[in-house]
Image (cartoon, grey):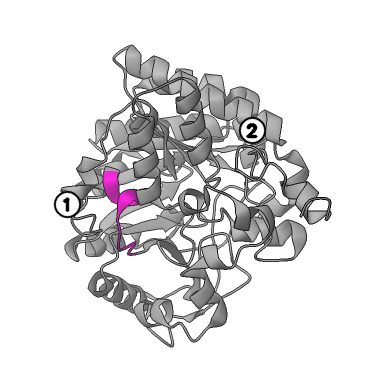
Amino acid sequence: MIGVSKLYCGSIEASDPLRYGRLSKKLPSHLLQFSSDKRPVVVWNVTQACNLRCAHCYAQAVKEVGKGELSRKEALSLIDDLGRFGVPVILFSGGEPLMRKDLVDLAAYAVDQGIRAVISTNGTLITKEKAKELSEVGLSYVGVSLDGMERVHDKFRGSKGAFREALAGIRNCQEAGLKVGLRFTINRMNAAEVPAIFNLIEDLRIPRVCFYHLVYTGRGSEMIKQDLDHRETRGVVDFIIDRTKELHDAGKPVEVLTVDNHADGPYLYLRMVREKNSRAPEVLELLRMNGGNNSGRGIGCVSWDGSVYADQFWRHRSFGNVRKRPFSEIWSDLSDPLMAKLKDKKRHVKGRCAECQWLDICGGNLRVRAEAVTGDIWAPDPACYLSDEEIGVKNYRAVKKGSLS
């Protein structure tokens, strides 16, 4: 997660997280990514059920509530364990989390345990009454997924009217005093919609947007040919940076983040260096605090059936189940070779990743994407769009061919 607005527009300084000792439990939400202890943010897929069928759904959600979901008693026990373990945030996801009837109660219980509760939703089920309930229990944030404007979004979601229903949900959150933002997954079919999304943010005064790079998992694995190439990715990232700065300079600051491609961090820094931006050294320090991808360390996932994963995308490799062992115990058990390596994965990445001067900043990017394309967990992430020269291994290919000593 790269905070474009924080870094490029200077809305935070390196001293800000230091004032809190960089401890997850003490940091305000906008500084949490700079924690040093990296207590995991837990994505909890509370249900596999969803009222839509999205083309890129990593969870491969289904229409009906399936068997095997954690019971209310099991769910409360999980939250108790996460609270004791020091988890700073539970992101309630799905499927569509609002398909689970006791979601509001679970969110309220998490807040009572001192955990920030947020939800990731398609927005279509957020009525005025539901928004009021979520606000009253202390929900911190609602992230509503939009994949473009009406025609494009409805096609992605597999449901005519989904766009208008999502906008209604956003307005209902705003009226209830809930912080609400957008989530947008970039791919070739909707990249041209990014300017319109920024216009929508400005028009509706939406304070936050996360632009996600495509991850090849779940139904998203069927869209691999729709991912942007490296040149296209750079173009979209540059546009996001430019538009973020325009809004900031116009006195309309929006929190803008890019997610799931940590090459965005060094790319932003290198751009600031080229522009002779005096804040570049401070941004570099903040990027080091961020640490890049934290799958298996600073982010984890619990599925509807209690299975524990390194992140929400890596669903084919479970480390255990909370029905048999607490999450805290599973997460801390380094007897599993993969879990142990993920805690320090920079030592295990291969190829140009291993030689990259930005490894401490990127963290090796997404291992699940590397595995999806190459079959090797530790191979370079194919979505890294930085050139060999930019990562400091200008002669990498020549060396690998044996033409240089």
Q: Say whether residue 193 is left or right of residue 131.
A: right
Residue 212: image quadrant is: top right
Q: Say whether residue 151 is left or right of residue 339.
A: right
The residue at the point 30 percent across, 71 percent down is 82
Q: Would you say residue 156 is visible in this rendering?
A: yes
The residue at the point 74 percent across, 39 percent down is 226
Residue 86 coordinates in the image, percent (x, y): 25, 68
Residue 336 coordinates in the image, percent (x, y): 52, 83
Magenta-drawn stretch contains 317: no
Residue 391 coordinates in the image, percent (x, y): 60, 43
Magenta-drawn stretch contains 36: yes
Badge number at residue 20: 1
Q: Which residues are magenta?
A: 31-39
Badge number at residue 233: 2
Q: Disc 2 on helix, strand or loop?
A: helix
Residue 346 drawn above or below residue 141: below
Q: Would you say residue 130 is visible in this rendering?
A: no
Q: Going by the picture, which residue comes out furthest to the front?
A: 405
Q: Say whether residue 17 is left or right of residue 275.
A: left
How dense is the environment of label 2, judged by Cα within 10 Å: few (below 14), some, or many (20 and up)? many
Residue 170 drawn above or below residue 291: above
Disc 2 to disc 1, how far (Cα)? Answer: 35 Å
Mark 1: amino acid: Tyr
